[in-house]
């Protein structure tokens, strides 16, 4: 009966074209339906089919889709053109979506130190341990879908979109297909495309929804039920495997897993009048970066149908011109009558709304709400946080859905390098403990040359940008060949610092603070001193202003971003101590002895810019400067900085290629450096680097020295952290004790 009706309808259309306006025209214009299948990345080929339809003058009256077809179809139903959809697909960072990674520049500044910087992170909780339901939580893709689906945020009935739309998902509880016709459009598209074991399923009402492609990958019946008289289908999903493809395990598993979907397609394709199947062999279903190639193959597959589609468009126009598409893409603002928070047990509503900085009745655009989601996620409170907008009667409700992390998280790593030796890194982070809007971070590097960094931060304003912190820092660091008086040798520097600071974060990647600290430094010779000196120690108080920027996309082997630190400090030596044999003598301003108690000022700046990766090459350049107004007049050791090594080992350590860590004590310097990093294989890097510095050594009154260094490094981003091995050459006319050629090895994460 259905086929008979279609034949009669098509004959009528051809009749209308042949006899023009003299023919008898039925009152109702036949409706055109479009079906877009799943196929993961291969579904991008649908855009090429849409482009040919646009060129033929055809616009569907109804659209259905599954999986990737639901995303392409859903956005097309909003009014995006084929060209716009291709631009969106090319603009999306698919690598981030498919890796479940978030760029470091979307993590708030104080949390960057823990982000992707440990081997393990374990929740410290009394609740039952739950394994993740999918490899990818959906944080990234849901943000993208909500951003581009913004124009339809206040439309909960998909039949009222500019082009009526429906998509198909699978309910994992009932193992039945679910046709999504109402709700929040980005959620519907996300549920329909949630590939099991890759993306976690999405709960909508009482259903737990996953990819619709396993039961109904080609929803032709659904578009017919919506009212389509004529149906065009684009199919980019699975076809039955050939005998050759069944010769390996992959082909057999795919055939078994997708057998129901293939069978369903065979049943549904009979409902379609024009079936377009792009030839996509040779492109992986996960190669989302092949957007241009997939578009071209879809376009090429649709071109043979173009003449027929033009005739169809002319035929339909004989029944009356199609109504213009309602334009909703220019919607910019919504105002919300209520803000609801769901899924939060640890973080109170007031804190979440404070971070969002959105009030009821206020006009909000997608950029502000997207930034608010970034700020919330960047707080490291949530495994996932997203928004949805729900119209209820005459009200518009903003709903924030949260999936909280535990209140306490334990991080663990191992590390080795030439300067610190081997050790274990343990960190504990606690949110909203012991008070609301507070964070405790306890970081320990347990080794001979240890590091301790503890802090308690308390936020004091609504959006948690302003707060104060109590900080404690300690380290035990080896300084090679340090001059003290007339003696030279290895020195242990044991540093202790505790203080109070007022902090303000500026967006995600900037922070400034004003701190007051008490600093104690011990200098302990590792040799037998001729003057029987056991140690020197200094007690300082320091007031420091610091402004920092960190917009790197990754903490290790970054591709782009900026590091900037500017600080200015004023320090006073309160007491100095010298231990000779078993005797310890203390000095103060009234009895200065060999110490200088004059106030000194420190100005410090460093800048590093990573340029966007091109053809797997990343270039960076850096600039560093330091000026200290006064050094200890006799010992010249109480307020120096140390140059050398590849990473900063403590507060006064400055990396300089060509020299051992902490090799050169200085009180002033200015330097430039550059580096070229080539990722020649996935996660494997070759780096060439060099720098030049003009320095004034700690004990030098006038003049400066020039130092040069260059080196090569091989690096690998492993599951235990970055592994780096390199060789470097340093040129310094005052170098007496070290070879000019040096090698180094570093394994694992470090703070």
Image: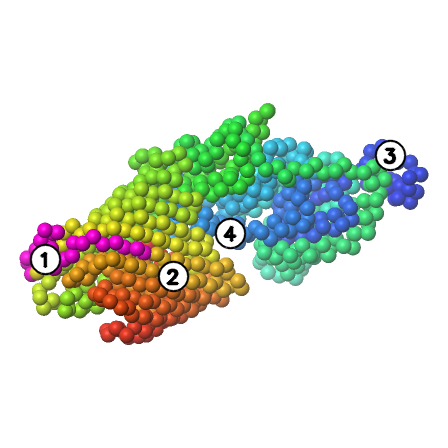
Q: Position of residue 181 (x, y in %)?
A: 64, 34
Is tag 1's residue or tag 3's residue first in the polypeptide sequence? 3
Magenta range is 581-604
Is tag 3's residue or tag 2's residue first in the polypeptide sequence? 3
Res 200 visible: no
Number of the front mark, 3 or 2: 2
Residue at point 51%, 63% (across, down): 616
Residue that carries the numbered disc 1 in the rendered image: 593
Mark 4: secondary structure: helix
Q: Find residue 26 and name its label.
A: 3
Q: Is residue 167 within the magenta segment?
A: no
- Gap between marks 1 and 4 measured at Cα: 61 Å
Number of the front mark, 4 or 2: 2
Q: Position of residue 443 (x, y in %)?
A: 30, 49
Dot 3 surroundings within 10 Å: few (below 14), some, or many (20 or more)?
Answer: few
- Gap between marks 3 and 2 measured at Cα: 77 Å
- From the viewer's side, name the closer residue of 749 and 172: 749
């Amino acid at each position: 009966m259905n086929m008979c009706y279609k034949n009669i309808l098509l004959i009528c259309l051809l009749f209308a074209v042949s006899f023009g306006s003299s023919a008898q025209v039925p009152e109702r214009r036949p409706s055109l339906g479009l079906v877009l299948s799943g196929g993961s990345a291969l579904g991008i080929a649908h855009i090429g089919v849409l482009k040919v339809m646009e060129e033929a003058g055809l616009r569907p009256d109804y659209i259905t889709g599954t999986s990737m077809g639901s995303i392409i179809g859903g956005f097309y139903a909003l009014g995006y053109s084929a060209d716009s959809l291709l631009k969106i697909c090319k603009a999306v960072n698919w690598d981030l979506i498919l890796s479940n990674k978030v760029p470091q520049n979307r993590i708030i500044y104080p949390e960057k130190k823990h982000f992707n910087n440990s081997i393990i992170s374990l929740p410290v909780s009394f609740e039952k341990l739950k394994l993740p339901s999918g490899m990818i939580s959906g944080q990234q893709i849901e943000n993208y879908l909500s951003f581009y689906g913004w124009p339809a945020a206040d439309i909960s009935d998909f039949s009222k979109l500019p082009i009526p739309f429906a998509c198909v998902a699978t309910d994992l509880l009932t193992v039945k297909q679910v046709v999504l016709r109402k709700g929040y459009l980005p959620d519907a598209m996300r549920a329909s495309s949630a590939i099991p074991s890759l993306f976690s399923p999405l709960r909508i009402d009482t259903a737990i929804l996953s990819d619709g492609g396993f039961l109904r990958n080609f929803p032709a019946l659904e578009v017919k039920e919506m009212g389509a008289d004529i149906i065009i289908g684009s199919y980019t999903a699975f076809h039955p495997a050939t005998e050759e493809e069944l010769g390996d395990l992959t082909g057999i598993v795919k055939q078994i897993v997708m057998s129901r979907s293939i069978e369903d397609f065979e049943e549904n394709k009979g409902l379609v009048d024009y079936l377009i199947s792009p030839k996509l062999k040779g492109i992986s279903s996960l190669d989302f970066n092949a957007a241009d190639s997939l578009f071209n193959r879809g376009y090429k597959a649709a071109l043979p149908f173009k003449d027929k589609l033009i005739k169809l468009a002319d035929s339909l126009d004989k029944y009356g011109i199609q109504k213009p598409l309602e334009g909703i893409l220019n919607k910019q603002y919504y105002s919300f009558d209520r803000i609801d928070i769901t899924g939060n047990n640890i973080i109170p509503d007031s804190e979440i709304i404070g971070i969002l900085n959105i009030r009821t009745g206020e006009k909000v655009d997608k950029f502000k709400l997207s930034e608010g989601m970034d700020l919330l996620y960047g707080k490291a409170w949530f495994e996932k946080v997203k928004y949805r907008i729900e119209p209820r009667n005459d009200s518009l409700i903003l709903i924030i859905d949260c999936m909280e992390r535990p209140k306490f998280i334990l991080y663990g790593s191992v590390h080795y390098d030439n300067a610190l030796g081997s050790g274990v890194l343990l960190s504990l982070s606690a949110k909203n403990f012991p008070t609301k809007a507070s964070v405790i971070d306890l970081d320990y590097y347990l080794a001979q040359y240890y590091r301790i960094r503890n802090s308690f931060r308390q936020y004091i304003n609504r959006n948690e940008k302003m707060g104060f912190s109590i900080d404690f820092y300690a380290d035990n660091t080896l300084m090679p060949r340090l001059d003290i008086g007339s003696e030279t040798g290895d020195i242990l520097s044991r540093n202790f610092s505790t203080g109070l600071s007022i902090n303000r974060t500026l967006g995600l990647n900037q922070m400034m603070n004003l701190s007051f600290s008490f600093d104690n430094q011990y200098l302990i010779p590792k040799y037998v001193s001729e003057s029987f000196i056991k140690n020197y120690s200094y007690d300082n108080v320091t007031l420091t202003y610091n402004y920092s920027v960190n917009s790197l996309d990754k903490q290790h082997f970054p591709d782009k971003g900026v590091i900037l630190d500017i600080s200015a400090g004023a320090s006073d030596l309160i007491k100095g101590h010298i231990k000779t044999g078993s005797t310890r003598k203390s000095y103060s301003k009234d009895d200065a002895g060999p110490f200088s108690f004059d106030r000194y000022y420190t100005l410090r700046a460093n800048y590093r810019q990573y340029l966007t990766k091109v053809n797997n090459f990343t270039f960076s350049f850096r600039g560093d400067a330091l000026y200290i107004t006064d050094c200890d007049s006799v010992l010249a050791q109480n307020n120096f900085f140390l140059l050398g090594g590849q990473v900063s080992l403590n507060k006064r350590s400055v990396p300089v290629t060509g020299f051992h860590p902490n090799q050169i004590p200085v009180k002033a310097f200015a330097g430039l450096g550059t580096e070229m990093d080539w990722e020649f294989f996935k996660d494997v890097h070759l780096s060439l680097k060099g720098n030049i510095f003009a320095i004034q050594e700690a004990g030098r009154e006038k003049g400066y020295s020039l130092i040069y260094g260059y080196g090569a490094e091989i690096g690998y981003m492993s599951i235990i952290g970055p592994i780096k091995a390199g060789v470097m050459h340093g040129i310094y006319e005052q170098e007496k004790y070290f070879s000019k050629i040096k090698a180094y090895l570093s394994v694992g994460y470090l703070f």
